[in-house]
Image (cartoon, rainbow, N blue to C red):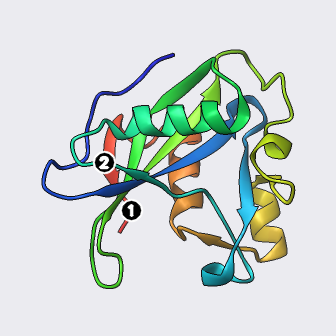
Amino acid sequence: MILVTLSCPTTAACWVRPVVIESAARRFVLLPGGQQTVGCWTVPSVPVSAGEPYAQAAAQWLCRRTGLSDLRIAPVVGVLPAVGARRHTEYVVLMRPAAAAWLEDVRALLEGGARWWTLDELQAKGVSVEPETLPLLLQGYWDGWLPDGEVSLE
């Protein structure tokens, strides 16, 4: 498993938002929004302790949740800084399989209502996504115009 060692700030808690992707098919898994994001599709929010590597927290959460262990983390990380109502920093990490495609039905392992989406499907159906900048992050990653490292998603 490849892990990025960047950590949450030592003085504050943060959250990591793991996004399960399949690069060859240019698709990703979204979950139906809960009470706070009704009518919207989203990705999980996983709390991370102060000083803990957020990529490690995302990988451990996904391994516990799905039983999958052969994961790769993309070198591009989206950052949603703590502003306004969001009182904590959120890191969006892209999780992909070590192989060309997932060998298991990842969406079913995550949650019964989860589904695979492409950016074209989101746009064609006018689907709202949270975080709302996620499609832009995925487009930049797949098209190669985002640099490796942390990228602000403000």
* Mark 1 residue element: loop
7 left or right, relative to 99: left
Q: How far separated are the C-alphas under marks 1 and 2?
A: 22 Å
Give the amino acid type for the residue marked by disc 1 in the picture.
Answer: Leu
Whether the residues at callouts 1 and 2 have beta carbons within 8 Å, the answer is no
Residue sitting at x 77%, y 52%: 118
Give the amino acid type for the residue marked by disc 2 in the picture.
Answer: Ser
* Mark 2 residue element: loop
Please state the horizontal and vertical placement of residue 77, each as a whole percent of the image.
40, 43
Residue sitting at x 41%, y 31%: 56
Disc 1 crowd rating (10 Å Cα; few below 14, some 14-19, many 20+) is: some
79 left or right, relative to 101: left
Quadrant housing the C terminus: bottom left
The residue labelled by disc 1 is 153
Residue situated in front as seen by the camera: 44 or 127 = 44
The residue labelled by disc 2 is 49
130 left or right, relative to 53: right
Please state the horizontal and vertical placement of residue 129, each as a whole percent of the image.
64, 70
Disc 2 crowd rating (10 Å Cα; few below 14, some 14-19, many 20+) is: some
